[in-house]
Structure formats: C-alpha cells, structure tokens
Amino acid sequence: MGKFYSNFSKANQLLDGNILIFLDLVRGISAILVVMAHLSSRLFVGYGHLENPNIFVKLLYLINLLGNPAVIIFFVISGLFISRSVLKAIYEDKWSWQSYLINRFSRLLVVLVPALLITFILDSLAVQFGGYKGYDSISSNLIELIGNLFFLQNIYVNSYGSNAPLWSLSFEFWYYMLFPLLACLFLNKESKTHMLLYTLLVFSIVSVIGIRMNTYFIIWLIGPLVLFLPKVNSLTHKFFKLTALMVLFLSMIVHPLAMTGRLFFINQELKDLMQLFGVNLFVGLSFGFLTYSLLHGGLLKMINIEVRSIGKFAKLISSFSFSLYLIHYPIINVVYYWLAANGYTGLQPSVMSVIFEVFIVFMMCVFAYLFSLFTEAKTHLLRDFIKTRTNRLISSQRGKMLNKQKEVV
C-alpha cells in the first residue's frame, strides 16, 4: 500500500498544476460537443437526404457525432476528481461519509432539481404547441420525475421527459456510491461490522444497477487508475504525449463511425451485443493515457505556450458545463417540435447553416452560464444549508438519547 500511496501523493500534488486548466478546458469543450451532437440531429436533414454529400459535409456530420465519446471523457474526468477527493480524505484520516454525501448531493441536486423543472415546463409547451408525445399520463410523469430525483433512470424508470442526457447522471451517481465503498473496504481501517455492511452495500448496488452500468464503471475507474500509476519517464516523453493525443483523436473518430455502422468489422448485431463498449473503452483509455502523460510530463513542455493565458477561459466554460449538459436538450426539443409543426424539415449543410449552428450553440452556452449563476455557483449555499440542518438533527437525536439515559439512571 505504501507504493500506491506514494504514487497517489505525487499525482495529487501535480493535479493542482497546469493539468487542472487542461481538464477544465476538456470538460467545457466536451459539454459543447454533446450540445452540437444533439442540436445537429434536429437542425440538419438526415444523412440519407443530403443533396451534396461532399467531404466538407461528411466532416461536419462526423464532428457533430463527437458528443457520444465526449460523455466517455466526462466519465474519466469524473473518476479522476471524485476518486482523488475520496482517496485524499482516507489517506489523511479525514474520511467522513456525512461530509462526502452532503458534498455529492448538493453538487448534483442544485442543478438537477431546476433542470427537471425546466424540462417539465418546456415539454409541456412542446406537447401543447408542437404535438410532442411526452408522457402517457400524469402518474407516469410523476413516477418518472421522482425516479430521476433519486437517480433511478436506466434502472426502474426512463430519463425524465425529453431530457435523454440524464441517462449518464444515474451512472455517475452510483459510481459515486460504489467507489468510496470499495475504497473503504480495501484502504480504510474499518470494524468487522462496517466491512460487512460495505460488502453488502456493494453487492446490493451491483446487483440492482444492471450489466451495462456495471460494465461502464470500468471506464470510470480509468480516472483513479491514472492516480495510482507510477511515473514512467519514457511514457512522459514528448513523443508519447503526441502519440497519446493522436490516439485520442483516432478513438474519437472511430466512435461515431462504429456507432453509425460504417466500420466493416462492426455490424448491427455486434453493435447491439457490445453496446459499443469496446469503442468507448478505447476512448476512455486514450484519454486516460493522455492525461497520465501530461500529468507526469508537464503540460507546458508539450505545447510551449503559457497555459495560464487560457486558464480563465477554461475555468469559465467548465463552470457551467454541468448546467449546459442538463438543460440543453429540452430547449432543443421544444424548438424543434414547434418548428416541425410549422413545416420545418431540416437544413441542408452549408456555410451559412454551420454559422447558424455555431450561433445557436453560443446562445445556449450564454443561457447555461446565466442558469449556472443561480445553480452551480450556489452549490456552497445548499451544501452549508444541508450540513447545518444535518448537524442540528444529529445533535438533537444525541440530546434525546442522553436524556433517556439520564431518566433510566
């Protein structure tokens, strides 16, 4: 364990450097790629209806399919930072389930609850003015809403309404629960009772969340793997950094090709069977390798620019990336159905239509930023509120127990 701790300690220190700017930038760009993927499917005509499928058009459609591998990159970044906070607390003997759960729930719910409300409002408008078939009944709507509040989409309910991107949030949440349980089992000094409880909880979660969610946990674990790997000087050489970057680009391109059945070795039956896990794992490992090489090799040595010059921009776009991810699709959905009800069938790709796409994405980023000022930016307020209420409740219960003990005596 000493070697693992040594590796983690070095990686933990390095994460406070320029690599943090890189990861913030990637997180923000990944959210934008997801928006582009979802927007393009409603903005442009289908691939089979193209009037002039030249190389420019094919490249545009390829770029607009990068949202799916971007979500995989989200998983790796999430695994990196969540595992870092858990491992740091355990190694420093400061681990607290109460503090961890409050931090995680406040971070998620401060954006999720308003996003679900926006989804309900926009879906209702889409039903009324666009003919969107959003819900079977009021009861199914309510059940779906409650299920998403407790991160049960993909397990017992569907993603709420039109907000399909919520699928990944349930994955993230249950990984947030699984990792600290496993870390406490293997790294923390626990009583036999706690060990038994943690083991039962792990098996319970694994048995409930299903095969696909369990399988993608492997990709999420690439994040903590980066923290535990020792520094290998040859792998941090500039050649390997460039190689890692090229492999990542290759994996990002391979993903949409495989997803659309354009790779000769992936047919529909195999795609359905594997759920593209192999391609997603390729993306995750590629990004993990790039992060590892930049973490231990130094970011400045690779790109030869003052990274902090883009630090403010990276911090800005990452600050509202979660908000952008959770609210963009209901907006796209309501506008699309309203336009479709009025005869809209999609745009042919052109310079002007691409400029229009970029403008829409920019405006959605502006809206998400404004939304984040009242959600993500207020996470600390919700966290402090929950912490205060929880501490009062615990103190009250302890006081009642002491009073009962005194009465008995």
Image: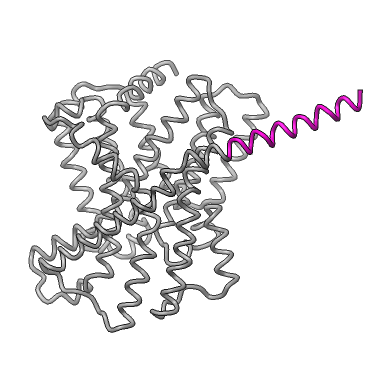
In the picture, measured across the screen, residue 292 lies left or right of residue 305, that is right
Asked if residue 58 shows in the view, the reply is yes
In this figure, what is the number of numbered marks? 0
Magenta span dominant secondary structure: helix
- Give the residues drawn in magenta, as a range: 386-409
Give the quarter of the figure containing the N terminus: top left
Q: Residue at x 27, y 84 (%)?
A: 343
Decide which of 364, 70 is in the foreground and name it: 364
Asked if residue 286 shows in the view, the reply is no
Q: Residue furthest top?
A: 2
Q: Residue at x 50, y 57 (%)?
A: 153
Tell me if residue 345 comes above or below residue 115 in the rendering: below
Colour convention:
one colour
In the picture, measured across the screen, residue 137 lies left or right of residue 37, that is right
Q: Residue at x 52, y 57 (%)?
A: 148
Decide which of 89, 6 is in the foreground and name it: 89
Decide which of 101, 379 is in the foreground and name it: 379
Q: Where residue 165 sits in the image (x, y, percent)?
A: 39, 58
Identify the image quadrant of residue 266. Answer: bottom left
Identify the image quadrant of residue 33. Answer: bottom left
Identify the image quadrant of residue 195. Answer: top right
Tell me if residue 160 comes above or below residue 4 in the rendering: below
99 in the magenta segment:
no
Q: Where residue 276 sits in the image (x, y, percent)?
A: 33, 55
Tell me if residue 280 comes above or below residue 180 in the rendering: below
Q: Where residue 61 sits in the image (x, y, percent)?
A: 18, 63
Give the quarter of the figure containing the C terminus: top right
In the picture, measured across the screen, residue 326 lies left or right of residue 395, that is left
Q: Where residue 319 sits in the image (x, y, percent)?
A: 34, 43
407 in the magenta segment:
yes
